[in-house]
Image (cartoon, helix red, strand yellow):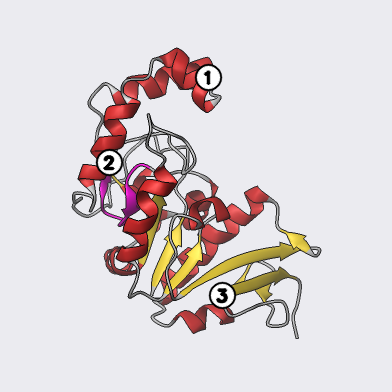
């Protein structure tokens, strides 16, 4: 089973001390193509193109044109899902499980393993880098990479579009008959991913037995490729 998470736009400011040795991501040539385009952008172009604040635009322009410290992907991202995941509390056996089963979708790096070395970046699947569209660039590569895998998608729909795995299930959290609010859904995805890691689940079907906060699997609302976890008690 491969569990897919979305990345985050925010990164930890301090490195974790408990992280094992880092490694090179799987698709450096593709990342370099994107980097070559992004480093051409001025701060003003970053601000206009990506609708960033002046401060964020300057930061991203500087990132693309200077050396940055490398950090393991799972320890680098610090958005809502990752704060709920709590990578800082992972033990050695947890890291081993994560390295085998957990993957992070990325518009810049493609498909990240937890210990892949990354630098902070800002790029979404539909953000063009020159003439390169990350969604179009990565989709065939990631689809092939996951072709033989049993996939559980705990990513947003935006990032889930980056791959068309034949055996993939998308997890949807529902609240009051609607999709859970974005921020809450991110936290739930991170919490579910951590539950899977703690339990060392090997079979995807076992995920349906989990309770995430007050959300449980609803078989009546679910489909073969879409598992719905709904707030409230289910019979």
Frontmost residue, 185 versus 96: 185
- Please state the horizontal and vertical placement of residue 113, each as a whole percent of the image: 30, 57
Q: Magenta segment: does it hold 39?
A: no
Give the residue at mark 1: 48
- For marks 3 and 2, the one nearer the N-term is 2
Do the CB atoms of the residues marked 3 and 2 lie less than 8 Å apart? no
User: Residue reaching furthest front?
Assistant: 131
Residue 45, quarter of the rendered image: top left
34 or 214: nearer the viewer? 34
Specify which label sits upstream in the sequence, 1 or 3: 1
| Circles 1, 3 touching at the beta carbon (< 8 Å) | no
- How packed mark 2 is, by other alpha carbons closer than 10 Å (few <14, some 14-19, many 20 or more), is some
- Camera-nearest residue between 215 and 101: 101
Q: Is residue 110 magenta?
A: yes
- Position of 124 with respect to 16 (left or right) is right
State the residue at coordinates (42%, 69%): 165
Vertical placement of residue 192 versus 75, above or below: below
Q: CA distance from mark 1 to mark 2?
A: 23 Å
77 relative to 189 in the view: left or right: left
Q: Which residue is mark 3?
A: 225
Q: Which residue is mark 2?
A: 31
- The span shown in magenta is 108-117
User: Whole-Å distance between the Cαs marked 1 and 3?
Assistant: 38 Å
């Amino acid at each position: 089973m491969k569990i897919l998470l979305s990345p985050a736009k925010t990164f930890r400011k301090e490195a974790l001390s408990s992280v094992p040795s880092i490694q090179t991501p799987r698709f450096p040539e593709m990342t370099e193509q994107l980097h070559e385009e992004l480093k051409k952008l001025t701060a003003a172009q970053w601000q206009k193109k990506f609708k960033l604040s002046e401060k964020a635009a300057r930061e991203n322009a500087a990132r693309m044109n200077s050396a940055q410290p490398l950090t393991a992907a799972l320890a680098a991202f610090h958005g809502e899902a990752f704060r709920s995941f709590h990578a800082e509390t992972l033990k050695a056996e947890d890291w081993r499980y994560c390295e085998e089963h957990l993957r992070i979708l990325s518009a810049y790096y493609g498909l990240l393993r937890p210990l892949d070395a990354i630098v902070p970046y800002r790029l979404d699947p539909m953000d063009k880098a020159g003439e390169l569209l990350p969604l179009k660039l990565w989709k065939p590569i990631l689809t092939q990479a996951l072709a033989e895998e049993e996939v559980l998608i705990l990513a947003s729909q935006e990032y889930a579009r980056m791959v068309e795995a034949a055996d993939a299930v998308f997890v949807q959290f529902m609240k009051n008959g609607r999709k859970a609010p974005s921020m809450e859904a991110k936290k739930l995805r991170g919490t579910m991913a951590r539950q899977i890691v703690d339990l060392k689940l090997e079979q995807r079907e076992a995920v349906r037995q989990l309770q995430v906060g007050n959300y449980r699997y609803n078989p009546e609302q679910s489909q073969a490729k879409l598992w719905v976890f709904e707030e409230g008690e289910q019979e």
